[in-house]
């Protein structure tokens, strides 16, 4: 997150247990964020990602990015079916 912030990106943390991360307000879910989210960058176990893909589609994100070490064909299929670009098993940094 810090690396993305230092590159000028706005990062919105989504975590039901955090209200702030690195100076940015945290939200319990994607649907709680009022502003547009372009990329949903996921740092969760692969089995958690299909429902995240569904929520990313629902909010109108443009891409689902599963960080290095995370792959889910089910999540990818759901995201692609909703029109999102999908990247898996790659570090966004």
Image (cartoon, rainbow, N blue to C red):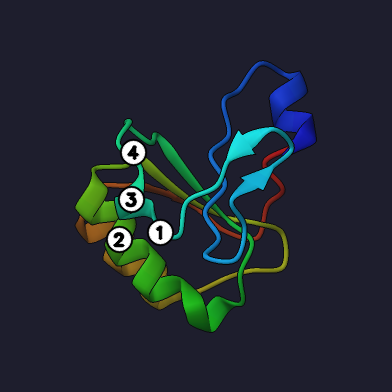
Q: How busy is the neighbourhood of tag 3: few (under 14 within 10 Å), some, or many (20 plus)?
A: few
Secondary structure of residue under mark 4: loop
Give the mark nearest the N terminus, 2 or 3. Answer: 3
Secondary structure of residue under mark 2: helix
Q: How busy is the neighbourhood of tag 2: few (under 14 within 10 Å), some, or many (20 plus)?
A: some
CA gap, disc 3 and disc 4? 17 Å
Give the mark nearest the N terminus, 2 or 1. Answer: 1
**Relative to 24, does residue 44 appear above or below in the rendering?**
below
Mark 4 or mark 2: which is in front? 2
In the picture, the disc for residue 32 is: 3
- Quarter of the image containing the C terminus? top right
Q: Pointer 3 and pointer 4: residues touching (CB < 8 Å)?
A: no
**Relative to 73, does residue 40 appear above or below in the rendering?**
above
CA gap, disc 3 and disc 1? 5 Å
CA gap, disc 4 and disc 2? 12 Å
Residue indicated by mark 1: 29
């Amino acid at each position: 997150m810090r690396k993305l912030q230092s590159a000028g990106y706005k990062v919105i943390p989504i975590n039901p247990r955090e209200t702030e991360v690195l100076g940015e307000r945290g939200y319990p879910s994607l649907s709680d964020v009022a502003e547009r989210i372009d990329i949903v960058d996921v740092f969760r176990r692969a089995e958690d990602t299909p429902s995240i893909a569904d929520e990313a589609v629902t909010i109108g994100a443009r891409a689902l990015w599963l960080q290095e070490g995370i792959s889910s064909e089910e999540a990818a299929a759901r995201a692609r079916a909703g029109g999102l670009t999908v990247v898996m098993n790659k570090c966004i940094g």
